[in-house]
DNA sequence: TTTAATATTTAGGTTTGCCTAAAAAATAAT
DNA sequence: ATTATTTTTTAGGCAAACCTAAATATTAAA
């Protein structure tokens, strides 16, 4: 029905529109898709003709209901496949994205639905990102970051904001994975770093850069 | 590394070269890929430039070692995914081909290998077709068809020559699946049909068209 | 063996998605 | 408010993979 490229554009625009009212800009889309602004302009015209987005020259774009639906369906597939790769095939959470970028374009409603139930209808992917259901609804999400936590609070790692392999590998090295328990022991005003105990064992100092990228649930 | 289209051409040529010494003809490739002969000519030139096949005008084509390797790797992925769909997700054997046509192009050696062992290193796909191993070697195969069997012989269904959904659904209706046991009770000289008992229960007459398309193993 | 039929290739054209370079619009700075 | 900068769009082109129509080879038939 839709090409890989079209789905990728819709997914990027969906992501970039999160929060902002104005939608996504040409340049931002180009950067995210690692292509040139001129190519994006081209493509926006085509997607607009297909009623997948609203496009007025120089004014950025917003997805239509149809465009949003396709974007969310693609995200759903991406995240379900990530769960599959980690839970069933034993991949590390830092190596699933690339493969899921391919698998997300497989067209078969039946496949997606069966996969979903085969995996036990997971609500979050291996990075803690929410998986929309069949109807496109995202599960609610605790969006507290570690940075916001008080001294002496105990928290469970629920997700990461930055999902780059570099960051994920660093967390791996620290022994911080989804579900890990952290105990906040100290907060350094000077640089925003925090001293935490990980899974009741090792003591580590986490930079502010790390703390702001960790979603947690208070215990 | 290679496009979907390239992989599909190589797979088609590999299939059409089975047995015949002369390789595949332009028309046969066009028919199999549901495209036009002119498009095939175009593509053969390109694949030849990439040293994936040997092409001399008007003389048909043969795959090079490299081309053959890609074709077999694609077949391997296709068949592994078919096993996944049937064994893990409960798809019917007549509906997996279409989805596997998409999944076979996913590029990730790790994925293929992990999938293989997750499925228990299967030797045959849901239609009884052999799955090449990591190195591209096909498991040996009993290529007896039901048609060749004598009266009173007992056989197990091992595969189908025709894998069209129509045929597979008809078999389903007859209660004939992979592993089913057949007892040959009668052979009709007139039209080549055979009267068989299926799984020690129902008695049915199978047309010659059906018999020639069933691979069996003698008990 | 010459003609007829079939198979294959060439020529020229389309669409998709990308590019660079240049023009135009929008935003920021003086 | 005019200039400078940045953003976006247009113009013109390219490669992949397809198409139709016409030309050329090959094979089969008379």
Image (cartoon, coloured by chain):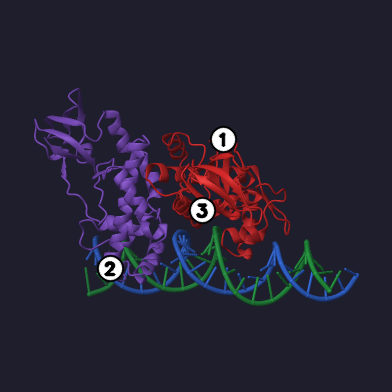
Chain colours: A purple, B red, C blue, D green
Q: Front-most of A49 and A100?
A: A100
Residue A51, image x, y percentages: 33, 70
Chain of the residue on which disc 2 is drawn: A
**Foreground tag (2 vs 3):** 3
Residue furthest to the top in view is: A201
Residue B57, image x, y percentages: 72, 58
Residue annotated with mark 1: B219
Q: Helix or strand or loop: what does disc 2 sit on? A: loop
Mark number, residue B135: none
Left or right, A100 with reference to B197: left
Residue A69, image x, y percentages: 29, 60
Chain of the residue on which disc 3 is drawn: B
Residue annotated with mark 3: B4
For the image, the number of numbered tags is 3
Tell me which residue sits at (60%, 39%) in the image. Answer: B142
Asked if labels 2 and 3 share a chain, the reply is: no
Task: Classify B83 as above or below C27.
Answer: above
Mark number, residue A59: 2
- Res A61 quadrant in image: bottom left
Task: Classify B100 as above or below C1.
Answer: above
Q: Front-most of A161 and B122?
A: B122
Q: Is residue A28 visible?
A: no
Say few, some or many: other residues with alpha carbon within 10 Å of mark 3 (under 14 / 14 to 19 / 20 or more). Answer: some
Q: Is residue B188 visible?
A: yes
Q: Quadrant of the C terminus of chain A?
A: top left
Distance in Å between CA atoms under marks 2 and 3: 36 Å
Q: Helix or strand or loop: what does disc 3 sit on? A: helix
**Foreground tag (1 vs 2):** 1
Tell me which residue sits at (53%, 49%) in the image. Answer: B2
Chain of the residue on which disc 1 is drawn: B
Residue A123, image x, y percentages: 23, 45
Q: Helix or strand or loop: what does disc 1 sit on? A: loop
């Amino acid at each position: 029905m839709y090409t890989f490229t079209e789905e990728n554009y819709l997914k990027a625009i969906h992501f970039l529109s999160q929060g902002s009212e104005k939608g996504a800009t040409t340049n931002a889309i180009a950067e995210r898709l690692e292509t040139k602004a001129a190519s994006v302009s081209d493509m926006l015209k085509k997607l607009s003709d297909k009623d997948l987005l609203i496009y007025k020259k120089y004014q950025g774009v917003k997805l239509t209901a149809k465009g949003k639906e396709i974007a969310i369906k693609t995200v759903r597939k991406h995240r379900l496949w990530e769960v599959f790769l980690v839970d069933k095939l034993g991949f590390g959470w830092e190596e699933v994205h690339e493969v899921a970028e391919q698998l997300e374009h497989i067209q078969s409603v039946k496949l997606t639905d069966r996969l979903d139930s085969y995996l036990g209808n997971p609500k979050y992917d291996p990075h803690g990102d929410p998986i929309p259901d069949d109807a496109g609804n995202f599960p609610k999400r605790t969006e507290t970051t570690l940075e916001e936590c008080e001294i002496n609070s105990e928290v469970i790692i629920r997700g990461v904001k930055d999902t780059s392999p570099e960051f994920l590998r660093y967390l791996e090295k620290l022994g911080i994975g989804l579900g890990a328990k952290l105990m906040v022991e100290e907060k350094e005003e000077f640089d925003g770093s925090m001293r935490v105990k990980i899974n009741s064992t090792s003591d580590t100092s986490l930079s502010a850069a790390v703390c702001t990228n960790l979603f947690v649930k208070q215990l």
